Amino acid sequence: MSEEDAPYRPIGSARTQVEEAGRPLAGKRLALVTGGHRRLGGVISAALARAGHSLAIHGSHDTRLDSHLALALEEAGTEWDGFVVDFTDPEQAEELIANVAARFGRPPDILVNGAAIFGQDRLENVTAHDLMQHFAVNCAAPTLLTKAFATVPAGAGDRCIINLLDQRIDHPHADQLAYTLSKLALAGLTRTTAASLAPRVRVNAVAPGLTIATPDYTDEQIGRLEELMPLGRLPQAEQIAQAVLYLVEANAVTGQTLYVDGGAHLQSYDRDFMHLCR
């Protein structure tokens, strides 16, 4: 299941806000956010828009915007455009950077690798297809995007990549095996490329805890899960977005992972949160 397949309120199709194709966006940094039109990706995109950045918003099947994001783009007068690329064919990801550069007249300054899929497999039932599909979307596509981002001709100035991980990487459990392995690989990519791309590109990560609950959770369950967190609360989507904004501006920081999870990464849980406190 893709994070983009969870329920949402669509608000039409993507609208081009670039005044003139190929015209540089003077005085603004351009951010490419994968999976940036909905759910947590949409909250991150909205925060970047409010911070004054122009946006290239990616979706795997469409770029219909969550209503709050559409409103934020309108209120901020954000220059933006949408790009549809299916990362199950990760070779297409490498072309996305060039397509964004052609549309905006410049390559992106900021790359947020947020697109992801997740399933409910475990070792006893995981398939080769599960493993390969999760790796393609959750690690291979970000790797090729990182490659293209780092090699495209770009001007002077701070350029950065932020990868969206998961708090479970510190204490993996047996649920959602293909997803977990792919996020562990993405964490490895973060550390590797932070070293190899410095000083030209900074690479950091944000590792959220349970943030936007799906319909699998009840309100009562969420309340009990909050009590399991060391801080006694779960993170809000806006707090994840604030961590991304910090890393965008923190030009002396690279190779770091910020856990925004109520302290969940400090503890080990036997199962995925959806199976606990029922």
Image (cartoon, helix red, strand yellow):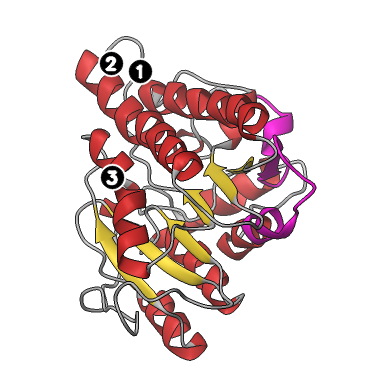
Residue under the point 49% across and 31% down: 272
Kindly identify the amino acid type of the residue bearing the numbered disc 2: Val
- What's the CA distance linking mark 2 and mark 1? 6 Å
Give the SS element for disc 2.
loop
Give the SS element for disc 1.
loop
- What's the CA distance linking mark 3 and mark 1? 33 Å
Residue under the point 54% across and 53% down: 211
Kindly identify the amino acid type of the residue bearing the numbered disc 1: Arg
- What's the CA distance linking mark 3 and mark 2? 30 Å
Give the SS element for disc 3.
helix
- Could you say which is closer to the camera, residue 216 or residue 132? 132
Q: Name the front one of labels 3 and 2.
A: 3
Q: Position of residue 159 (x, y in %)?
A: 60, 52
Residue under the point 61% across and 47% down: 224
Tag shown at residue 126:
2
Q: In the picture provided, is 159 more to the left or to the right than 82?
A: right
The residue identified by callout 3 is 95
Q: Position of residue 170 (x, y in %)?
A: 64, 25
Q: Is residue 23 magenta?
A: no
Stretch of the chain drawn in magenta = 244-269
Q: Residues within 10 Å of mark 2 (few under 14, many from 20)?
A: some
Tag shown at residue 46:
none
Kindly identify the amino acid type of the residue bearing the numbered disc 3: Glu
Q: Is residue 262 magenta?
A: yes
Instruction: Please indicate, yes or no, whether residue 42 appears anywhere in the rendered image.
Output: yes
Tag shown at residue 122:
1
